[in-house]
Amino acid sequence: MEYVSRVPRPPLDGLIDDLYYLAGAPPYALLTLPAAPSPLLVLNLGTPFRIRGGAEVETAEYSDGCVVTTPTRAWEFGYPPRTRSVGVHFKPWGLAPFLPMPAAELCDRPVPVEQAWGRPAVAELRDRLATADGPHEMLTLLEQELRRRLCETPGLGLVRQMSSVIAATSGAVAIGDLSAAAGVSSTHLAQRFKELVGVTPKRLARTHRFTATVFAINPAAPIDWGDLAGGAGYFDQAHFGHEFRAFTGLTPTRYVEVRRRFLREHPGHVLDGWPLPAD
């Protein structure tokens, strides 16, 4: 697969981790994406893909793309044999200025991009992207569209500041300390987070702690799960295992088995590191 990524220019760089272009044959038809503190917007330029937002959710087909705020559980992404898309990995608070609805409405509920931006506008943008001269021009067009849609968002400064503290501590900060430092009640802070991030500060902190812990795992080396859980601040290994199943749908040992399968079957693949084969 071809993957091209870049960080946008200010002020979008304060909202977005990267813009990306992805095309080619996926390593697996069905991938599991563990929960991560990263809202996502995808503009599809190829055959429709399919998403299931949880084990109890019906699989849905997306032709124009999708948008979803910070997920709280693993979700399945079904690729066609050949895929082509551009997308945005947002910072936890970064999607809010581009949405016409509260972020909580899209938490674990991916919706078509047209539901957020309108069918005519999305169709016109997809046409321009499809006829662009290569990935770099496509990312420039996407960045221009995002700059055009950027809106002032009340409360964003507060949420951004507190989210940055959560990220800097890998989720280890006490939420009560956050609200005290912000000079607001814990209820007010939670409401703002749900409105602009989609989840509460406590849930975001859990997600940051989990992802930091998982990225520290070397699947090619022996793993002491007790040491890993204790070092990450989990109460005990049982609590760690519960979090693992909640965020990935897998036990820790099964997760490593699946990661090793990816490394074995597709060494050095551009998608290696977070998605997991689900087929």
Image: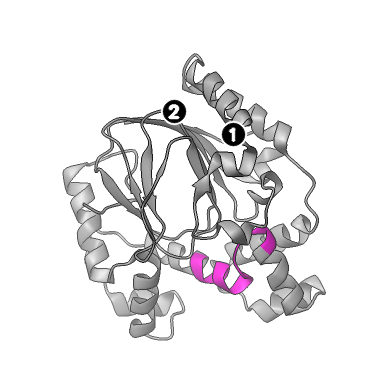
User: Which contiguous range is marked in magenta?
Assistant: 195-207
Q: Quadrant of residue 80?
A: top left
| Residue 21 visible in the snapshot | no
Q: Nearer the viewer, residue 152 or 230?
A: 152
Give the position of the N terminus as an image quadrant. top left
Q: Give the residue type at disc 2.
A: Leu
Q: Quadrant of residue 176?
A: bottom right
Q: Is residue 75 left or right of residue 173?
A: left
Q: Nearer the viewer, residue 69 or 211?
A: 69
The residue depicted at 56 percent of the width and 27 percent of the height is: 123
Q: Relative to 60, say whether 218 is above or below.
A: below
The residue depicted at 21 percent of the width and 52 percent of the height is: 279
Q: Looking at the picture, how far across and down is residue 170, in whole percent?
A: 54, 66
Q: Examine the structure image and report whether residue 140 is included in the region drawn in magenta.
A: no
Are circles 2 and 1 on residues that touch, CB within 8 Å?
no
Q: Looking at the picture, how far across and down is residue 62, in whole percent?
A: 43, 41
Say which residue label 1 marks: 119
Mark 2 / mark 1, whichever is N-terminal: 2
Q: Relative to 143, say whether 182 is above or below.
A: below
Q: Relative to 11, say whether 236 is above or below.
A: below
CA separation in Å, label 2 and label 1: 15 Å
Q: Is residue 111 left or right of residue 33?
A: right
Q: Give the residue type at disc 1.
A: Arg
Q: Relative to 138, say whether 249 is above or below.
A: below
Say which residue label 2 marks: 45
Q: Looking at the picture, how far across and down is residue 229, in whole percent?
A: 38, 77
